[in-house]
Image (cartoon, rainbow, N blue to C red):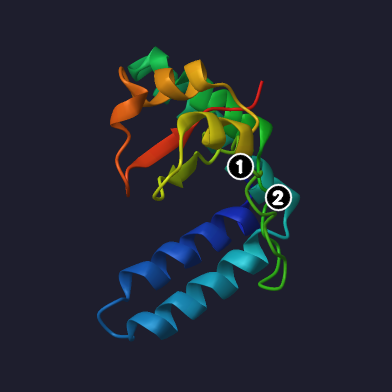
Amino acid sequence: MMLNRPVLHSIALMFCLASSASAASSSSLEREYQQVRTIALRDPRVQAAYRDADRRLEAKILQIDPALKPYVEQKQGAKAPVQTSRFTKTPPPPETKVAPRKTPPARKTHTVATGETLGAIAGKYRTTVPALKAANHIKDERKLGVGQVLTIPEAK
């Protein structure tokens, strides 16, 4: 693509500003650069030159590492508009949906009080004695201790 004189002049001006970095402070240099860039990007030919440069760069990236093809395709699909003014905002990045974590249901527990039996506890939580014994690895229900914490299985 052949660029005409005004476009080349704009680009040359940008390089001149960049080379005079030792004379100007960093922040003022950045402001000048952004101002020149904003003016230059109003020209459709400069915009086309940027798009062409991006296309060639992406082709080089794929030539160097073909595994980056999904990255290049994603970038091509979500191209930000060329910024023509400092008040133009680029769109926010697309939101990624994250599946909520599945947390296991809260376990019910019961602390054994004096005089309680597995049958009474099972009735209170609408479960069965064998289910309570299995959930808590109890072999002999007569050896239930006061203060023992039992896991309550889900009601049947």
Query: Which residue is at a point 66% across and 37% down the rendered structure image?
Result: 78
Is residue 31 shown left or right of residue 144?
right
Disc 1 on helix, strand or loop? helix
Circle 2 Cα neighbour tier, 10 Å, few/some/many (<14 / 14–19 / ≥20): few
Q: Is residue 57 above or below residue 84?
A: above
Q: Is residue 65 above or below residue 103?
A: above
Residue 81 location in percent, x, y?
Answer: 70, 50
- Which of the pair 117/74 is nearer the observer? 117
For the question of whether residue 39 can be seen, the reply is yes
Residue 96 location in percent, x, y?
Answer: 62, 40
Q: Amino acid at mark 1?
A: Ala
- Which of the pair 53/81 is nearer the observer? 81
Q: Earlier in the sequence, mark 2 or mark 1?
A: 1
For the question of whether residue 2 can be seen, the reply is no
- The C terminus sits in image quarter: top right
- Which of the pair 109/138 is nearer the observer? 138
Q: Is residue 45 above or below residue 58?
A: below
Residue 123 location in percent, x, y?
Answer: 62, 32
- The residue carrying mark 1 is 49
Residue 83 location in percent, x, y?
Answer: 67, 59
Residue at far front of view: 115
- The residue carrying mark 2 is 81
Query: Which residue is at a point 64% across and 27% down the rendered structure image?
Result: 155
Query: Which residue is at a point 32% across and 34% down the rendered structure image?
Result: 144
- The N terminus sits in image quarter: top right
Q: Amino acid at mark 2?
A: Pro
Disc 2 on helix, strand or loop? loop
| C-alpha span from label 2 to label 1 | 14 Å
Is residue 145 shown left or right of residue 3?
left
- Picture quarter containing residue 151? top left
